[in-house]
Amino acid sequence: MGTAEHTYSKTDWPEAEIPLGLRALYERRRKDEWQATVDRLNALRQSFAEQRRHIIAPELRDRIKNVARSGLRDDPRGPGLRYRSFVEARNADLDLNALKRLHKRAYSDVGALVKSPEAFHRHETVVGSVTDIFKQPPIVYVAPDPDKEKLFLPPFGGCWDRLDQNQATGDGAIVENSSYLDCAGRFGSKLIARNSDASDVDLLCAYRENGYLVPFKTLRTGILQVKADLSALICRHHISTYDEFGWSDFHATTRGRLVLAVFWNWEDVEPANEVSDQWFASGLDCSGDGESFPGTSIQAVPGERRIINLFTEMAFPAGRELWIYVGVADRIWALLNDVSIDISIDSAWQLNSLAVRSL
């Protein structure tokens, strides 16, 4: 396959590595933001747990759980754990309506913090809907118009494992947080978290983002359009749960985003503009008593092609030297109340090409 005059590869960029200054400053800032979010989540978790203890004392909670479980062992053909738990709670004059209102408010507060809609922006998906899987257009090379766009093909200039963070409380653990980034066009993450004996209220959260950085000089004044052509290698999301108590509950989410960031210069810790396709991998979002769960969801079949258009939300002057970053950000989180969980993302993609245009 030939390349156009304005196609860049790794050899065109002598400084393929991300400058340490930019990397360190950006990671420090993002870790501060992550820690601020974690602190707010922990504050909500602790407040939730404290209010629950006012409604149901730990001693009463343990007694109800033990009685319900022992009765289940005595007669496995009889009523289930949930029914037995409710019977014991009623016999103890527990205010279940107050407990339900508390749980609903707590999950709403945590969801608003973790899934804030203002953080993401919806953009056009050209290829990638379910109906496109069996009628995808062939990958045909078309030379870019040098007056309109520049095309980048792998291997790309700067590969950047941009950020990874973990948070787990109680007996929860982030079992794996690894990167598929290979600096030759592949990127993505493998995240696995488990809690096999959730305490009163537990939190799990894992995040990783990685991608590629390419140089671009604006051709005219205007916003930028970045077209990313990707093929799925694996994209599997999983959530399975187990009700430990009988009337427990949980809320868990997996999500994958395609991120576009534009940097003015290497010294800028903050991107001049950053947008993302929130539903690049829609993921799983579930809640309930832990007795039902979505299991494994194939978000994209191996070989499935997706072309995503991302547009900046600000214009850039003509002749400005910029650095364009495109990456995949995967995240899992779960708030557990006496519910065991196995939650994971296994997502790897091949970036076939990037086309950058000044509009």
Image (tube, rainbow, N blue to C red):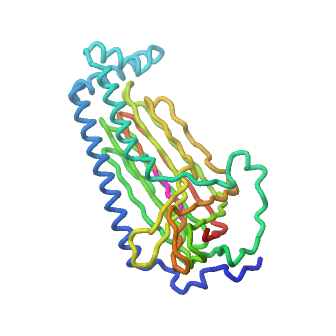
Q: Which residues are magenta?
A: 327-331
Give the dominant element type of the magenta stretch: helix, strand or loop. strand
In the picture, the quarter occupied by the C terminus is: bottom right
Left/right placement of residue 239 relative to residue 149 reads: left
Q: Is 251 situated above or below 77?
A: below
Residue at the (37%, 73%) spot, across then down: 24
Whole-percent x and y of residue 199?
Answer: 31, 37
Furthest-bottom residue in this view: 14
Which residue is nearer to you in this view: 65 or 183?
183
Residue 26, image x, y percentages: 38, 69
Q: Quadrant of residue 83?
A: top left
Instruction: Name the residue nearer the viewer: 192 or 269.
Output: 269
The residue located at (67%, 79%) in the rendering is 7
Residue at 53% across, 67% down: 211
Looking at the image, which is closer to me, 1 or 85?
1
On-image quarter of the N terminus = bottom right
Question: Image point 27% across, 26% down: which residue?
Answer: 61
Against 340, is 208 above or below? below
Please give left or right for residue 119 compared with residue 229 in the image. Answer: left
Q: Tell me, yes or no, whether the highlighted magenta stretch contains residue 190.
A: no
